[in-house]
Amino acid sequence: MTLQNHDEVIEEIKANVLEKKKHEIGKLVRDKARFLLLGHLGQSSNPLADDIHYEVTEDGVRVYTNNIINKYIEEGTDPHTIEPDDADALSFMSKEASSYDNGEKISPGDTVTVQKVEHPGTKPQPFFGQALALAKSEIRDIIENE
């Protein structure tokens, strides 16, 4: 083996180690983001958490979601009207007791059918940034350990 070949082998080994570390970091941050999202949702499992992914790029790691609902949770929403797209009405299960303007009472678990909902909006719950902050020391350990 020549010195030049030796140097090439060393560089290839370094590249492989770096690639493995990127995957390890991606999985770490993805899993923390999934855990935090479930906490925000108050659930132990939800398909939304499965829509958080990571990919290794030339420059590093990208943790992301393609699910618009996750984006709304992450960034929050302004007040908005929700109307049915392909139906005559919206139907959902009530989570809490309330009443209509006409005095009709709604109990938790009742099915509610309405033409539209005036949603008050939501506050941002930035689980991606929190996941990165929680993983910071573990990421440092991954990078520093050979």
Image (tube, grey):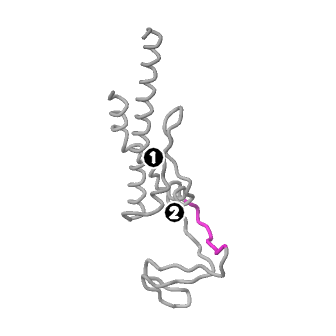
22 sits left or right of 115 in the view: left
Q: How many labels does the image show?
A: 2
As helix, strand or loop, the secondary structure at mark 2 comes to: loop
Q: How far from the left and from the top, in percent, is residue 84?
A: 64, 75
> Can residue 83 be found in the magenta stretch?
yes
Which residue is at the front of the view, 103 or 7?
Answer: 7
Which residue is at the front of the view, 137 or 101?
Answer: 137
> Can residue 1 be found in the magenta stretch?
no
First of labels 2, 1 by sequence position: 2
The residue under the point 32% across, 29% down is 145
Q: Which amino acid does label 1 sit on?
A: Gly
Q: How far from the left and from the top, in percent, is residue 95?
A: 44, 77
Q: Which amino acid does label 2 sit on?
A: Thr
Q: Which mark, by number, is residue 52?
A: none
* Residues in magenta, as a range: 77-85
Quadrant where the C terminus lies?
top left
Badge 2: few (under 14), some or many (20 or more) residues near its Cα, within 10 Å? Answer: some
Dominant SS of magenta comes to loop
Q: Name the residue beneath numbered marker 1.
A: 129
Q: How far from the left and from the top, in percent, is residue 112?
A: 52, 83
The residue under the point 46% across, 62% down is 47
Q: How far from the left and from the top, in percent, is residue 136?
A: 37, 39
**125 versus 21 height, above or below:** below
As helix, strand or loop, the secondary structure at mark 1 comes to: helix
Which residue is at the front of the view, 7 or 93?
Answer: 7
Quadrant where the N terminus lies?
top left
Q: Name the residue beneath numbered marker 2.
A: 122
